[in-house]
């Protein structure tokens, strides 16, 4: 049983977060989902309702899998040292670290992606590369998601579902990933290099 | 500006709910999302965290669009007269009524689908037809979603995203639906009759 620390903050993007969680929740014998917030107040989704945490940052940083969504709220979190410190510590402990959309900007700013390849939302690409404030991340312009060791960073919003199925495949096997998609009546993109939303052909 | 009443109850399915809301939230100038619960306690998602309501049933039944998700929690709600009465009244007032997955069982039990064609999750199909306790709904076994007048019922989980884009297309036009999918980096299934998850060829 692996524990998933699924991070919330005000302005997180709804589908970035709940798309991957839906896929993981299809295997409840394998994954326990824990929503983690800086405090117990919950987090207002970008354009949507409030999600309440199951745990707070002060409860610790020990999760087997991390999920970091993107959304407009990442802009504020980039300057939140409590968030960045927690992410840095939790990334060091985790077996697998995942991000969706602009969530990779937070991982990069926390220094967790140093020396790694990663991707992000294609319509926020230049912004993410800029605000990450690091030249040690290799940002991929054409990728549905990027796997580099324990890091799985995905492109925008819906790409998180495909990325989470790749995580399930690595941990539980191909059949388990196929079953999760089938039960969710989801037609996955199973090729990380098939990126219909890339804006340019070549990587930076 | 249309107000979307997005119903929550314990055991609602995460992607049934947040998939469509993500698509609607891409047009914030056109849609206001209001999470509606029976009371103010919020609702624990099936396998996931708690979502808090923006309004409760006692605040009224006046919404332009309704969203009714499915999930394991529908089983309890089928015997909840407060839920069924609220749905019946809200459906009568709404311009558009949508459901995802087993959410259509709740609409059917409330009598809102009498004389209509509808669909639901393909792996819960027989269960839904049975618990709906009505022979006046024409259940479609092969459909990604079904439009019948103001009712848009979708197949399982992920199908809600395709259905919500069809609602956006009807209300705001084809370009608006295409833009919402693009911004979410989502490759939609735009054909309601293209159902890759149908278990049988013919309709009942």
Image (spheres, coloured by chain):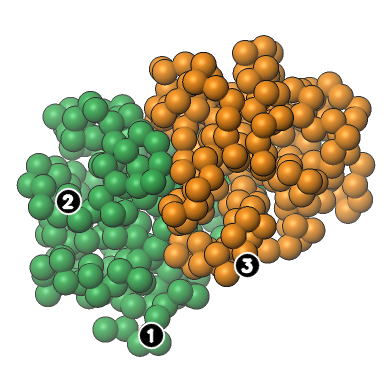
Chain colours: A orange, B green
Residue A2, image x and y in percent?
A: 53, 45
- Residue receiving disc 1: B200
Q: CA distance from mark 1 to mark 3?
A: 25 Å
- Viewer-side label of 3, 2: 3
Q: In the picture, residue A94 is in which quadrant?
A: top right
Report if the CB atoms under discs 1 and 3 are less than 8 Å apart: no
Residue at point 35% right, 66% down?
B121
Q: How many numbered dots are placed on residues in this image?
A: 3
Taking depth in this image into account, of A17 and A3 the one nearest to the observer is A3
Q: Is residue B198 above or below residue A32?
A: below
Q: Which mark is residue B76?
A: 2
Residue at point 32% right, 83% down?
B203
Q: CA distance from mark 2 to mark 1?
A: 28 Å
The furthest residue to the bottom = B202
Residue at point 29% right, 72% down?
B125
- Residue receiving disc 3: A174
The furthest residue to the front = A1
Is any atom of residue A151 visible in this view?
yes
Residue A127, image x and y in percent?
A: 78, 28
Residue B43, image x and y in percent?
A: 29, 36
Q: CA distance from mark 3 to mark 2?
A: 34 Å
Residue at point 36% right, 33% down?
B51
- Viewer-side label of 1, 3: 3
Question: Mark 2 belongs to which subunit?
Answer: B
For disc 3, the neighbor class at 10 Å (few under 14, some 14 to 19, many from 20) is few
Name the quarter where the C terminus of chain B is drawn: bottom left
Question: Mark 1 belongs to which subunit?
Answer: B
Question: Mark 3 belongs to which subunit?
Answer: A
């Amino acid at each position: 049983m692996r524990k998933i620390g699924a991070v919330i903050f005000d302005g997180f993007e709804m589908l970035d977060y709940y798309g991957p969680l839906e896929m993981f929740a299809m295997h409840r014998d394998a994954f326990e989902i824990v929503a983690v917030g800086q405090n117990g107040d919950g987090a207002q989704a970008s354009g949507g309702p409030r999600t309440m945490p199951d745990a707070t940052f002060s409860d610790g940083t020990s999760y087997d899998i991390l999920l970091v969504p993107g959304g407009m709220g990442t802009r504020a979190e980039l300057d939140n040292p409590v968030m960045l410190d927690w992410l840095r510590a939790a990334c060091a402990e985790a077996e697998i670290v995942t991000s969706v959309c602009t969530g990779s900007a937070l991982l990069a700013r926390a220094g967790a992606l140093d020396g790694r390849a990663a991707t992000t939302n294609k319509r926020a690409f230049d912004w993410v590369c800029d605000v990450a404030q690091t030249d040690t991340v290799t940002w991929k312009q054409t990728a549905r998601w990027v796997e580099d060791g324990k890091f799985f960073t995905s492109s925008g919003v819906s790409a998180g579902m495909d990325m989470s199925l790749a995580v399930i495949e690595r941990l539980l096997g191909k059949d388990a990933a196929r079953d999760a998609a089938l039960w969710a009546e989801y037609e996955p993109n199973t090729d990380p290099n098939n990126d219909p939303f890339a804006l340019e052909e070549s990587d930076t």
